[in-house]
Image (cartoon, helix red, strand yellow):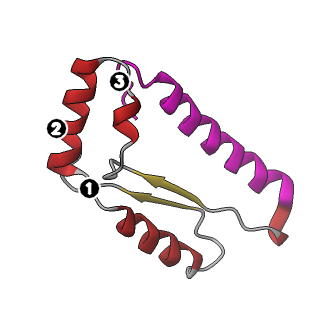
Amino acid sequence: MVPTPTMAVHGATRTAVRVLCDGLRVESGPDVRVTLASPGFVATDLVTGTSDPDVRAALEAQRDAVAITPDAIARAIVFGVDQPADVDEIAVRPTAQA
């Protein structure tokens, strides 16, 4: 993830979730399956919470140009659950996302 102005907490949270998943895999052993789903730009209203109006407008324009639907993320999660237990991460990003 590339840091974006006003999105530091979002980026830090994504990093924390990745480290938490890695730690759970190590600590839980083979009896608990942990799969991380890492979505790219998804067409949601998350960007409306951005406080800087210029950044918000830029993020909304990017969202409208490249974002994938929440349904695509749901289908990817179902796909991940259906995979063998040695699949531990799925990244789902729009092909147009830089």
- Distance between mark 3 and mark 1 Cα atoms: 18 Å
The image position of residue 66, as x and y in percent, is: 19, 50
* Disc 2 residue type (three-letter): Ala
Binning the other alpha carbons within 10 Å of mark 3 as few (below 14), some (14 to 19) or many (20 upward) gives few
Q: Main secondary structure of the magenta part?
A: helix
Which picture quadrant has residue 50? top left
Q: Residue at x 58, y 34 (%)?
A: 13
Q: Secondary structure at mark 1?
A: loop
The residue at which mark 3 appears reads as: 4
Mark 3 or 2: the one toward you: 2
The residue at which mark 1 appears reads as: 94
Mark 1 or 2: the one toward you: 2
Between residue 29 and residue 21, name the one nearer to us.
Answer: 21
Q: Secondary structure at mark 3?
A: loop
As drawn, 50 above or below 47: above
Q: Is residue 24 magenta?
A: yes
Between residue 90 and residue 67, name the one nearer to us.
Answer: 67
Between disc 1 and disc 2, whose residue precedes?
2
Magenta span covers which residues? 1-28
Residue 98 visible in image: no
Residue 66 visible in image: yes
Q: Are marks 3 and 2 in contact (CB under 8 Å)?
A: no
* Disc 3 residue type (three-letter): Thr
Between disc 3 and disc 1, whose residue precedes?
3
The image position of residue 83, as x and y in percent, is: 56, 79
- Distance between mark 3 and mark 2 Cα atoms: 14 Å
Disc sitting over residue 61 in the figure: 2
Query: Is residue 81 toward the left or the right of residue 94 in the image?
Result: right
- Distance between mark 1 and mark 2 Cα atoms: 15 Å
Q: Residue at x 63, y 71 (%)?
A: 86
Between disc 3 and disc 2, whose residue precedes?
3
Query: Is residue 89 toward the left or the right of residue 39 in the image?
Result: right
